[in-house]
Image: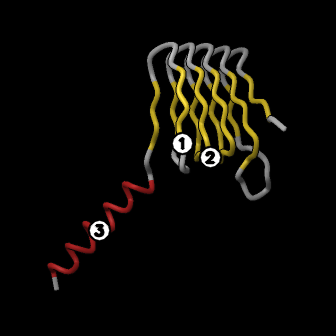
Amino acid sequence: MKMNKLIAAIFFLGLGQIAFSQISIDGTNQTQIIDCKGDRVEVAGSGHDITLRGNCGKIVLQGVNNTVKVDGLLSVELAGSGNKLYYSKALSKNGKLPQSILGVDNKIIKRK
């Protein structure tokens, strides 16, 4: 009986790691196209041009002069300066994008 509980716990923990995957981008001047697949995304550093295909979880965009384009997302947090986030749809139940903007000249722009 104890062995079955141990196997179940290991299986459950393994699934938890898959459900909370994260994409992290740091450094300078990277241009990337990434399939998001519901992941949380963190972008830091400067001068990045990142395109996220599909739907993402929360996006945390920090640093200086980064541009992120995303199809759909659950929420966004911007900090730093000169960052821009372009999105097509908010995935929240009410259709509004939960957001936090700190710093200067940071913009969240909805695309049509």
Amino acid type shown at disc 2 = Gly
Image-based side of 42 in relation to 74, left or right? left
Q: Name the residue under label 3.
A: 11
Amino acid type shown at disc 1 = Asp
At label 3, counting other C-alpha atoms closer than 10 Å, the crowd grade (few under 14, some 14-19, many 20 or more) is few
Q: Are marks 1 and 2 in contact (CB under 8 Å)?
A: yes
Q: Quadrant of the C terminus?
A: top right
Q: Quadrant of the N terminus?
A: bottom left
The percent position of residue 84, horizontal first and vertical second, equals 69, 23
Q: Name the residue under label 2.
A: 54
Image-based side of 26 in relation to 2, left or right? right
The percent position of residue 38, horizontal first and vertical second, equals 55, 50
Earlier in the chain: of badge 1 and badge 2, it is 1
Checking the image for residue 15, the label placed there is none
Question: Which picture quadrant has residue 4?
Answer: bottom left
User: Which of 33/82 is in front?
Assistant: 33
Checking the image for residue 35, the label placed there is 1
Amino acid type shown at disc 3 = Phe
Image-based side of 77 in relation to 8, left or right? right
Q: Under tag 2, what secondary structure?
A: strand
Earlier in the chain: of badge 2 and badge 3, it is 3
